[in-house]
Amino acid sequence: MSMLAEPFIVSYVVDQYVDTSSDSSLQEPFSLQDDEAEKRKKGVPAVVMKKRRLAANARERRRMQNLNQAFDRLRTVLPQIGNDRQLSKFETLQMAQTYINALYDLLR
């Protein structure tokens, strides 16, 4: 058999024994995907969503409190520049960087 005839034969066999006209052979009537899609359509009950939102808000509030406490601790070890007001977070980080570089230069 020649090399040119083989693609034709394969194509003929596929056309004869595999129905490529519809995707029905690829779909299962009661698949897990259908069940998951139905659950997503129904959605999560409002009570559950509210509890999740409250819990997420509490976690975020706790995270921000911890971050602010860390900035307060950092401010206590930085030298005062004479201003009455508290340094902003950005200013605190800038001052810490400057202070660390100055200490590093002293050690050289």
Image (cartoon, rainbow, N blue to C red):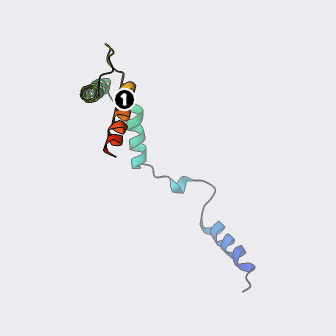
* Position above or below: 99 against 85: below
Foreground residue among 4 and 14: 4
Residue type at the position of mark 1: Met
Foreground residue among 42 and 62: 62
In this view, the residue farthest toward the bottom is: 1
- The residue beneath circle 1 is 95
Q: Please identify the quarter of the rendering in which residue 39 is found.
A: top left
Residue under the image location 74 percent in, 85 percent down: 2
- 11 on left or right of 73: right
Quarter of the figure with the N terminus:
bottom right
Residue 58 x/y as whole percent: 26, 25
* Position above or below: 36 against 28: above
* Position above or below: 65 against 13: above
Residue 108 x/y as whole percent: 34, 46
Foreground residue among 22 and 69: 69
In this view, the residue farthest toward the top is: 84
Residue under the image location 36 percent in, 21 percent down: 88
* Position above or below: 99 against 87: below
> What is the tally of numbered marks visible in this picture?
1
Tag 1: Cα neighbours inside 10 Å, few (<14), some, or many (≥20)?
Answer: some
Look at the numbered disc 1 and give the secondary structure of its residue.
Answer: helix
Foreground residue among 77 and 46: 77
Q: Please identify the quarter of the rendering in which residue 78 is found.
A: top left
